[in-house]
Amino acid sequence: MPNFGTVRENEAAFDVAIAYITSGDIEYGRSILAALRDHICSTGEQKSVQWILPKVLEILEERQICRPIPPS
C-alpha cells in the first residue's frame, strides 16, 4: 500500500492504483483508491480534496462491480 499524506504523496498513490487497475489487478487498485478516498476525507487536505478526490470518486464509481442478484 502506498503512503498517503501530502498532495504529492496522494497523487503518487492515485497513479499506483491506476497502474494496478490497468494491469488487471482491479481489486487491489480499487482497495488503494478506497483507502486514499478515506484518507483524504479524514484529513481534509485541501489540494487533495480539490484535485485528487474527484478523480478517485469518479474511478470508484465507474469501476463498481455489479454482482448479479441470485434467483429466488
Image (cartoon, grey):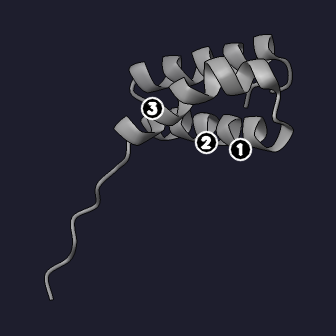
Residue 59 is situated, as x and y percent measured from the top left of the image, at 44, 31
User: Residue drawn 48% across and 41% down?
Assistant: 27
Quadrant (top left, top right, bottom left, bottom right) of the C terminus:
bottom left
Residue named by callout 1 = 38
Mark 1 crowdedness (10 Å alpha carbons): few <14, some 14-19, many ≥20? few
Q: In the orientation shown, which residue stands out farthest toward the bottom?
A: 72
Residue 3, above or below 40: above
Any part of residue 3 in sight: no
Residue 54 is situated, as x and y percent measured from the top left of the image, at 55, 28
Q: Quadrant of residue 67?
A: bottom left
Residue 46 is situated, as x and y percent measured from the top left of the image, at 79, 24
Q: Give the mark nearest the N terminus, 3 or 2.
A: 2
At label 1, the amino acid type is Asp
Q: How far apart, in angstroms, are the residues tagged by discs 3 and 2?
A: 11 Å
At label 2, the amino acid type is Ala
Mark 2 crowdedness (10 Å alpha carbons): few <14, some 14-19, many ≥20? some
Residue 71, above or below 59: below
For numbered disc 2, what is the local secondary structure? helix
At label 3, the amino acid type is Glu
Residue 29 is situated, as x and y percent measured from the top left of the image, at 53, 32
Taking the image as shown, residue 61 lies to the left or right of residue 35, namely left
Residue named by callout 2 = 34
Taking the image as shown, residue 33 lies to the left or right of residue 4, namely left
Residue 12, above or below 45: above
User: Residue drawn 47% across and 38% down?
Assistant: 60
Taking the image as shown, residue 18 lies to the left or right of residue 66, namely right
Q: Are marks 1 and 2 in contact (CB under 8 Å)?
A: yes
Q: How far apart, in angstroms, are the residues tagged by discs 1 and 2?
A: 6 Å
For numbered disc 1, what is the local secondary structure? helix
Residue named by callout 3 = 58
Any part of residue 68 in sight: yes
